[in-house]
Amino acid sequence: MSTAQTAASPALWRPLRVPIFRKLLVADVLSDIGTFMQSVGAAWLMVSFGVGPMFLALTQTASSLPFFVLALPAGSIGDIVDRRKLILVTEAWMVSVAVLLAALTMLGLMSPWLLLALTFAISAGDAIETPTWRAILPELVSRDNLASASALNGIEFNLARAVGPALAGALIAVAGVGPAFAVNALSFVGVIVVVARWKRPPRARTAPVETMRGATVAALRYLRYSPTIRGLILRSGIVMFFASAVLALLPAVAQRASGTSLGYGFLLGCFGAGAICGALVMQPARARWSNEIVASAAVAILGVTIVVTGDSRAMAALGVVLLVGGSAWIIFISLVSALVQSLAPDWVRARVLAMFMLVFQGGLAAGSALWGAIGERAGIETALLYAGFGTAVTAALGLAWRVPDAPADVSPWNHWRMPTLVGDVGPALEDGPVLVAVEYTVGPEQAAEFVAAMHQYQRIRRRDGASRWGIYQDTEAPDRYVETFVVQSWGEHLRQHARQTKADRQLEERIHGCVRGDPKVQHLIYARPRPRG
């Protein structure tokens, strides 16, 4: 094990050899520092208005809710349009809103509801950008370095989480909230410059471009028939619903313990520093234990730290507790998000990540609102007690949705023969529905194995585009089986050809091992009445 850890350590830094990745990482850490300064400023400004825990929690809800509302369209856009241009547009939007937020605050025109609205507007831009931002990672580094690049992104984010709040606390104590918002506006410049200079290679497409509606339907269908990804996404949302209490109520905890913005910045910095430690120890932990054990243990530890946070009053004790809590938080989130990203093929990656964020941020937003309401009515200690206990209990979700150890190979495996068009049969992309019939010849000794494998193959057909599926045996020729499936349009069937992955090869080879000769494929387009003449 020590040899494996020694070899893994240099691999962590290997993606930094890629210039564009290195530049984006540096620009992103500066941008994220500004984002955390804005979050601290918004939370402390809300405290200065003299509002209760409900409004404090709504600040986090305003930051999280756009990821829930805009996730699906954001993912679809990220898989359809030029990802570089989309990032530039969203960055320009966030700069504009950040400048407005800083100006109104410095002029003394800010109110609790206006602060919530502008916080929502900035997060809306981030929500549209984030699926695309994560989806471009495989374009920047090789597949072998993808896990290390994801870990570096996690370290970068949590370094910003540790530095940003501390800087914000000091700046707010000296100059007020307005300058902290102004620094956030300036922090976007680096990302804009780097992305604008990035010469992104043209994206090669082997299938027709999807529409927004079709892309969204395809994403939902893919998630429905991908049980491993679906389980990881649902599990993360439930965990975040309970664990959101620690960040939602942290401003109130800091005010109770210290009464200053420096105290809140210190506690949030401890949480971020703990997250960096968690990112560094995650790989050694995975080398020793399974992913499921690491994830469940992290969730259980996080639940205990939430309970202890509610009972603690001393800043030093809170700092230590949040250091541990931050480590557990990032281990679970990094592990699950990296697996979701590696399990999703390129054609649907932004949409899968968007649905991951939809459930993740939806749980964060709903949980923040609930624990804020409970904190206002029953007290902060009670809210954190219930939330911590609930977080610890969610470790049992591994019994239903286990975290896999080895992600499948989802690189493209486009081996199907393209349909042959004869005569004047030239369907438009929107023509359909399309019926595909595949005829197999199977001996009686292989029949049971073949039928069982075909019923497993149904999930792949439906995942990649089929709306209906069936396997039938000929009553007059018992060794003849016909598989049929329906796809909504000709264009969707052409895209279906490009959606199979190398992970599907084993099941397909198992099927063909039962078949005599080559299967015969037919493509039939729905025949609509045509005007005479």
Image (spheres, grey):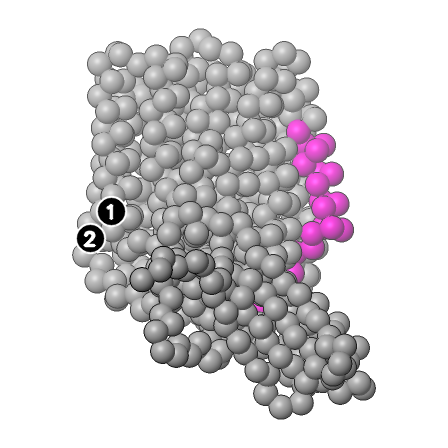
Q: Secondary structure at mark 1?
A: helix
Q: Residue at x 63, y 39 (%)?
A: 239
User: Which numbered disc covers residue 423?
Assistant: none
Question: Can see residue 319?
Answer: no
Q: Is residue 307 left or right of residue 364?
A: right
The residue lying furthest to the bottom in this view is 517
Expressed as whole percent of the image width and height from the top left, the position of residue 272 reads 48, 40
Q: Residue at x 38, y 34 (%)?
A: 123
Expressed as whole percent of the image width and height from the top left, the position of residue 93 reads 26, 36
| Image quarter hosting the N terminus | bottom right
Q: Amino acid at mark 1?
A: Leu
Name above or below for residue 156 compared with residue 15.
Answer: above
Expressed as whole percent of the image width and height from the top left, the position of residue 208 reads 36, 63
Q: Residue at x 74, y 38 (%)?
A: 393
Q: Residue 399: within the magenta?
A: yes
User: Which numbered disc covers residue 196?
Assistant: 2
Q: Which residue is mark 1?
A: 88
